[in-house]
Image (cartoon, helix red, strand yellow):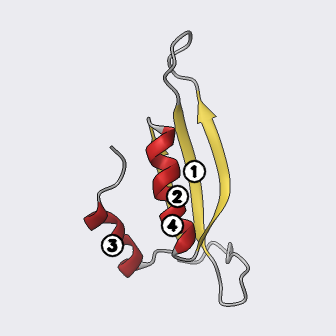
Amino acid sequence: KGCSEEFLEQLYEFAPQRVVYMSCDPATQARDAKGLVGNGYEIVSSQPFDLFPQTRHIESLVVFEKKRGDGETDNTGKD
């Protein structure tokens, strides 16, 4: 199902420096990632997890960070 529109709107309003997004559906995570990137975030890491071997299920962890005004990611660790 992914994130609801209401959640994403609130997330964009709060504008946290870092978003850690774990999903069991990479398709909806990709859909939501498009919105995050379009709202000033950059993907800094992505890691799939095969927690259910020999099935089609996969978990996916993506870390986003808010871009600074100059287009670079501010990964100073200060929130």
> In the rendered structure, are the residues bearing label 1 and label 3 in contact, judged by CB atoms less than 8 Å apart?
no
User: At which x and y percent is residue 42?
Assistant: 64, 67
Q: Which residue is mark 1?
A: 62
Left/right placement of residue 5 relative to residue 59 reads left
Q: CA distance from mark 1 to mark 3?
A: 19 Å
- Front label number (2 vs 1): 2
Q: Which residue is mark 2?
A: 33
Please tell me which residue is depicted at 34% across the width and 54% down the height of the picture. 3
Q: Secondary structure at mark 2?
A: helix
Q: Nearer the viewer, residue 79 or 62?
A: 62
Q: CA distance from mark 3 to mark 4?
A: 10 Å
Q: Which residue is mark 3?
A: 9
Q: Earlier in the sequence, mark 1 or mark 4?
A: 4
Please tell me which residue is depicted at 64% across the width and 78% down the height of the picture. 67
Q: Which residue is mark 4?
A: 36
Q: CA distance from mark 1 to mark 4?
A: 11 Å
Q: Earlier in the sequence, mark 2 or mark 3?
A: 3
> In the rendered structure, are the residues bearing label 2 and label 1 in contact, judged by CB atoms less than 8 Å apart?
yes
Please tell me which residue is depicted at 30% across the width and 63% down the height of the picture. 5
> In the rendered structure, are the residues bearing label 2 and label 3 in contact, judged by CB atoms less than 8 Å apart?
no
Q: Secondary structure at mark 4?
A: helix
User: At which x and y percent is residue 79?
Assistant: 52, 77
Q: Amino acid at mark 2?
A: Ala
Q: Earlier in the sequence, mark 3 or mark 4?
A: 3
Q: Amino acid at mark 3?
A: Glu
> In the rendered structure, are the residues bearing label 2 and label 4 in contact, judged by CB atoms less than 8 Å apart?
yes
Q: CA distance from mark 2 to mark 3?
A: 13 Å
Q: Amino acid at mark 1?
A: Val
Query: For the residue carrying disc 4, how many other residues have a C-alpha within 10 Å: few (<14), some (14-19), or many (20+)?
Result: many
Q: Earlier in the sequence, mark 1 or mark 3?
A: 3
**Position of 69 relative to 47 (above/below):** below
User: At which x and y percent is residue 37?
Assistant: 57, 68
